[in-house]
Amino acid sequence: MNSDGKFLNIAENAVQRAVQNGAAMAEAYLLSSKELSIEVRDSEVETMKLAEDRGLGVRVISEGRVGFAFTTRLSNDGLDQVVQQAIANGSNTEPDQYYTLPKVSGGYPELNVYDPGIRGATVEGKIKMAQEMERAAKAYDPRVKIIETSAYQDAEVEVSIVNSLGLKSHYQGAYCGIYLALVAGEGEDSQTGFALKYGLKYSELDPAAIGSKAAERAVRMLGAKQVGSQRVPVVLDPYIATSFLGLLAPALSGEAVQKGRSLFAGKVGQQVASNLVTIVDDGRLPGGIASAPFDGEGVPTSETVLIQGGQLKGFLHNTYTAAKEGICSTGNGVRGTFKGTPEVGVTNFFIKPGQQEHNNIIKEVKNGLYVTEVMGMHTANPISGDFSVGAAGIWIEKGELTKPVRNIAIAGNIMDLLGAVDAVGSELEFFGGKGAPTLRISSMSISGS
């Protein structure tokens, strides 16, 4: 028997035992995962880790009470024990009428999320990828002094989910990626640079390009100086735009809205951003690292447009938060492990690309800043949207990138920032599961010397 049949049988067995033991509704979520990570330093393998994890989470619902337990023992004894624990845990929880499990509705999207080439590639080949990144970075410029991290990573997952309402599903997925962080130096000045690429296809990883990109980012910042405090147009590199997008992710969850923790609460149908801004979560995006046919509850994934042309359209939901609103789940019951219940989370979360080429966005700026780095984004307030972060980048004069700039700060509110977007780039760059194009903000305050 292949693993999907075997795992589905185990999950089905657990659900049957839960129902036989008195659960009104039951769900079993079985996850088997394998992760490989390789780091090299000076062409030698510094660390290599292979981690495997397999286990089952059981959720039971009776009279509005939810019980959950997990186990790594998939024998009949192990299933009996985890079911009894879940039922016992449920008896101690407060009842909530909105707890339910999804019924099967329609089919799942056909997605190509498993590349056998990832497993088929040799470990030696994966080590060579990390070594090639190092070589390319050092060859780019002699001022590249230190390679901090040159890493290859991949992971495979198999997910099986069964519930007592007739849902029974399985899928296999995998992803791979490379990451390089380095330091360039000249005299007493040193600057950092990084680059990464994660995706679903092994053949699409280009270590030479990533090595050169990380080196370029560090070298171009050598000799950076402060500028005076002023208010100017600001262009956000796709990585920085993605960082700001990450600040919005919690606020666009139905759970945050219901708990009064979202700056978007009560604003559906209102203009919350420039009409150039469209923000999407798409769990079935072709090539997306977070794509899957179904979420952590077995609900089919979908494309959810959250902000369209600057107007707030809605929020992300799992089965529980959707039940509270009297709507359907958006397929965002995210579950990174079998050890917990599904939380509302993003999948492939991105700002849709616009019409303008990156270079033209910069050409239209007479005097401004191209931001390539921010520090302290974790200090931003996701509930109010206020932020004050350290920044570095390259000064723009007469439409040209001129001198590197550092030791400055940019501050404001994410809603004002979204409202002031006056150009959106035509290229969309992903950094893991989040992505953005280049964004230009018509005016921002910069604090410098």
Image (cartoon, rainbow, N blue to C red):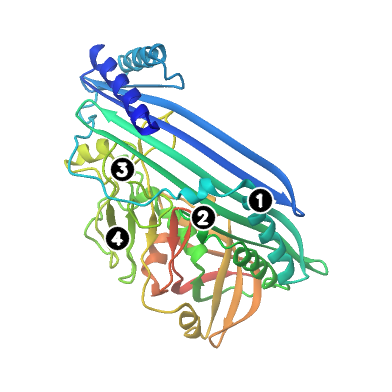
- Residue linked to disc 3: 294
Q: Would you say 101 lies left or right of 239 here? A: left
Q: Secondary structure at mark 4?
A: strand
Sequence order check, earlier mark of 4 and 2: 2
Residue 362's mark?
A: none
- Residue linked to disc 1: 127
User: What residue is shown at x 46% (from left), y 46% (from top)?
Assistant: 174
Sequence order check, earlier mark of 2 and 1: 1
Evaluate if marks 1 and 4 touch, with contact meaning CB atoms under 8 Å apart: no
Q: Amino acid at mark 2?
A: Tyr
* Residue 168 horizontal/vertical position (percent): 26, 32
Measure the C-alpha gap from mark 3 to mark 1: 33 Å
Evaluate if marks 3 and 2 touch, with contact meaning CB atoms under 8 Å apart: no
Measure the C-alpha gap from mark 1 to mark 4: 42 Å
* Residue 409 horizontal/vertical position (percent): 58, 64
* Residue 178 horizontal/vertical position (percent): 58, 55
Q: Amino acid at mark 1?
A: Ile
Q: Would you say 388 lies left or right of 433 here? A: right
Q: Amino acid at mark 3?
A: Phe
- Residue linked to disc 4: 307
Q: Secondary structure at mark 3?
A: loop
Residue that lies at the very extreme toward the right in this rendered image: 187
Q: Would you say 18 lies left or right of 153 here? A: left
| Pointer 1 local density, CA inside 10 Å: few below 14, some 14–19, many at least 20 | many
User: What residue is shown at x 24% (from left), y 57% (from top)?
Assistant: 313
Quadrant that contains the C terminus? bottom right
- Residue linked to disc 2: 202
